[in-house]
Each structure stands twice: as C-alpha cells, then as structure tokens.
Amino acid sequence: MRSSNPVFSREGSFSRDTGYAGFGTTSQPSAAGAHVGDPYANNPYAARPQGGPLTDEQLAEMYASPSAGPLQTGRMTMDDVVARTTLTLLTLVAAGAVAWFALPSGTYGFALGAAMAAFVVGLVITFRRSVSASLILLYAGLEGFFLGAVTKVFNDIWPGIAIQAVLGTAAVFGAMLVAYKSGRIRVTPRYARIGLTVAMGFLGLLLINLVASLFGADMGLRSGPLGIVVGLLGIGLGAFFLSLDFAEIENAIRGGAPQQEAWRAAFGLTLSLVWIYLEMLRLIAILRGDD
C-alpha cells in the first residue's frame, strides 16, 4: 500500500508496492533453475544430503560469510527509529535553548529566517529520493531555533506557557501511541482519506485567513470561541498525522525497510510533533488570554 503521508510516500521510502517496502523487487532463485554442478555452492550453511566432510574452500567460505542475526540484516528496527527520533528531538531542543537564551527580546529576525530556511530544507527532505541524516538534523536545528524564539515571546506574555505546551504535546503523543497500539485507532484507507481531506480544508482556511489579514480583515480564527475550536481541530489533525506515522513505521519494519530509512521516520514524527506543539501553544494562549 502506498503511503498517505507525503513524508513517507516518496519513491524509495516506505511505500510497499513491490519488494521490500517499495525499495525495489528482490529477485528470488527459481526452484526449476538449479545451479549447474553443486546446488549448495552458494550456501555454505545448507545441510548436505550425503553428510560428507566439507572441503577447504567451503570451510573458508563459511568463515568469510557474515554471522546470522538481526544486527547483520541492515534492516530498520523500532530501536533504530527511537534512537534517531531521540537524536533529532534533542537537536531541536538544543537549538531552541540557544534561541531562548541568546536572542535579545524584540530581535527575532534571525528566528524568522530560521523558520523560512527550515521550511525549504523540509521540502527538500520530503521530495528527495534518498534520505539524508545531515539534512534532517539541519532541519531540526533550524526549526528548533524558531520554536525557541516563538516560545520565549509567548512565555514572556503568559509565564509558564512553555512547559504547559510541552506537557500537552507529550500527552497527545502518549495518548495516540496507546490508542494505536491497543487497536482503538486503525489506519485504513478510508480513515486516511477523511483525515487528509479535513487537513486540506484546514490549511485552506488558514490560507484564506492569512490573505484576509493582509487586507486588514479578521476572521477570528485565532481568538475567542472560534479560535478555540480551530486550535482543537489543529491539535486533532496533528494527532491524525501521528497515527499515519505510526502505521507507516510499523509497515516499514514489517516490510524490511533499510536501516537508513529510520531517519525518514524520525523526520515524519518530528514534523507531527512540531505541528502539535505550535497548535497547543496557540490554544493555551487563547485560553489564557485574560490572564
């Protein structure tokens, strides 16, 4: 099944149309096409019906062959995803801390530049055929710098909002993970279509609001009761994106995706968490507007 998540739907990523998770078909030897000569020549570990002793050449081939085991397969595991996601998020948090402590109040030009650069790098990662760990860490650093600056602005106005947004994001992530692993949420094609349709409508609404604001109009999407509804919807869509991420990671591991693709999984999870965090920050700001 081809992924509904744009991060995981590039050729060479997690789509599973053919072969191992979309990475190309692997030719299998035909039962009718036996090797000329010794049929065990290419498999030094195969049992021989005659039970005779192995030759010196066969012993040397066995010695040179890699040992069997999961560490030698070169395939992605859940541990790989966890490790790379942790490194990506640590990079994001470290860059955010730099912006928080290094940027003087009122000077956020660098933060806006970092946001634009992160957007460009994110597009490159999404549409690049091969995954690049350095680009993903660069994205995390740029996005983290922007988030650190934005969070500092919000926290100066509403003290304590930063930790509230972090805890809220963690709660959404934990709840979605439990719901997905318990089977309460099933990522079916119909589920994905409905969610992506809502997401496209949500983004379209935000775009219309942005254009209207340029002409001095205020649709009230970021304040009042309507702003609360929009904030809750944004967080819900972020949770939906997480469910797509979980499903694609699970499918990729089951399909034998290469180990390097764990970086793409880390990138997808980071995108979803950043979305949820920003929407959580806005929602809490609306709820605390009268503080």
Image: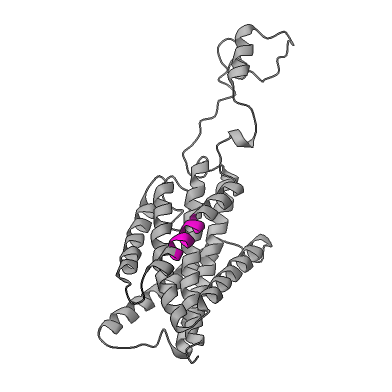
Q: Is residue 15 visible?
A: no
Residue under the image location 47 percent in, 41 percent down: 23
Q: Residue 223: where, in percent of width, then height?
A: 43, 87
Q: Residue 228: where, in percent of width, then height?
A: 49, 85
Whether residue 160 is in magenta: the answer is: no
Whether residue 96 is in magenta: the answer is: yes
Q: Which residue is farthest left?
A: 215
- In this orientation, which residue lies closer to the viewer: 168 or 219? 168
Q: Is residue 129 positioned above or below 4 on the image?
A: above
Q: Main secondary structure of the magenta part?
A: helix
Q: Residue 244: where, in percent of width, then height?
A: 53, 60
Q: Which residue is farthest right?
A: 51
Q: Which residue is farthest bottom?
A: 290
Quarter occupied by residue 203: bottom left
Tell me if 160 is positioned left or right of 125 in this view: right
- In this orientation, which residue lies closer to the viewer: 155 or 50? 155
Q: Is residue 59 positioned above or below 253 on the image?
A: above
Q: How many marks?
A: 0
Q: Is residue 191 visible?
A: yes
Quarter occupied by residue 138: bottom left
Coloring scheme used:
one colour
Tell me if 259 is positioned left or right of 214 in this view: right
Tell me if 132 is positioned left or right of 31 in this view: left
Q: Is residue 43 positioned above or below 89 on the image?
A: above
Residue under the image location 48 percent in, 92 percent down: 290
Q: Residue 109: where, in percent of width, then height?
A: 30, 70
Magenta part of the chain: 88-97
- In this orientation, which residue lies closer to the viewer: 270 or 180? 270
Residue under the image location 54 percent in, 63 percent down: 242
